[in-house]
Image: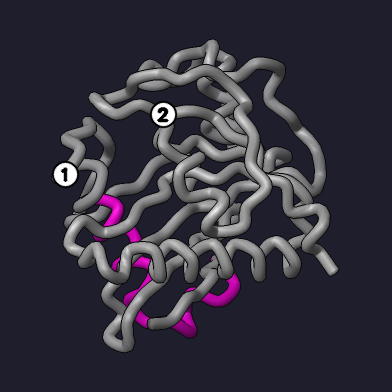
Amino acid sequence: MHSTTLSFANMHNHGELFANILRARRESFIVRNQWDLPETMGMEFDQYDTPVSRWLAVHDESGAVLAGVRLTPTTARCGIYTYMIRDAQRGLLDSIPADLLYGEAPVEEGTWEVTRGFIASDIPAAIRQKVRLKLVLQMLRTSREEGIRCMLALLPSNWDRWAARCKLDMAPAGRNMNMGGIDYQAVWIDFSTQLH
């Protein structure tokens, strides 16, 4: 089992891995969750998949993706869009409630957003925690490389059940809300003590 962080600067070194991440996202969000999201050629994507983002994947030797997330700096800007959580708060996204956060969405260096997180549905229960931990360790590695002190994530509301097992310092950033039949919550993840 491997973990990789992709960017537009390095994705050419990883063959089909970026396309495989987008294929796995399609399987997770469009096929399994039945969300109405953009797709083409068997891949899910949106307006936030830009060169400022990073894509983290846990994958096997063949490049099959077991889990993944997208990281985007809160300073991102592309046309009218910034990052998903902030744009939802600004009323630009119909699918996410504008009142998802307790406070105003940050725009600051060192704070990044985590979205499009998934673990493939066919991962056996016996190794799900191992896959999740591998993804968290890659998030930690990437936070050190990118100077990320804090992440703002949109996660299923059961995040508190596995946060302690993954040794993550997490706290609610907003209310519980049902989106597409799944309960979600915005959450702060503090990496500031682990940047050394």
| Predominant secondary structure, magenta span | helix
Residue 94 placed where, x, y %? 38, 16
Is residue 74 visible to us here?
yes
Q: Position of residue 180 (x, y in %)?
A: 26, 25
Vertically, is 120 above or below 35?
below
Q: Earlier in the sequence, mark 2 or mark 1?
A: 1
The percent position of residue 169, horizontal first and vertical second, equals: 67, 47
User: Who's the residue at 30% across and 52% down the image?
Assistant: 25
Where is mark 2, residue-wise? Answer: 184
Of residues 61 and 127, which is closer to you in this image?
Answer: 127
Say which element carries label 2: strand
Q: Quadrant of the C terminus?
A: bottom right
Q: Residues within 10 Å of mark 1 (few under 14, many from 20)?
A: few
Crowding around mark 2 (Cα neighbors within 10 Å: few <14, some 14 to 19, many 20+) is: many
Where residue 57 sits, quadrant-wise, is: bottom left
SS assignment at label 1: helix
Of residues 173 and 39, which is closer to you in this image?
173
Does the image show residue 50? no
Residue at 75% across / 66% down in the picture? 144
Q: Give the residues drawn in magenta, as a range.
A: 8-26
Residue 4 vs 51, above or below: the answer is below
Please give the residue where the numbered disc 1 appears in the rendered image.
32
Q: Is residue 120 above or below residue 169?
A: below
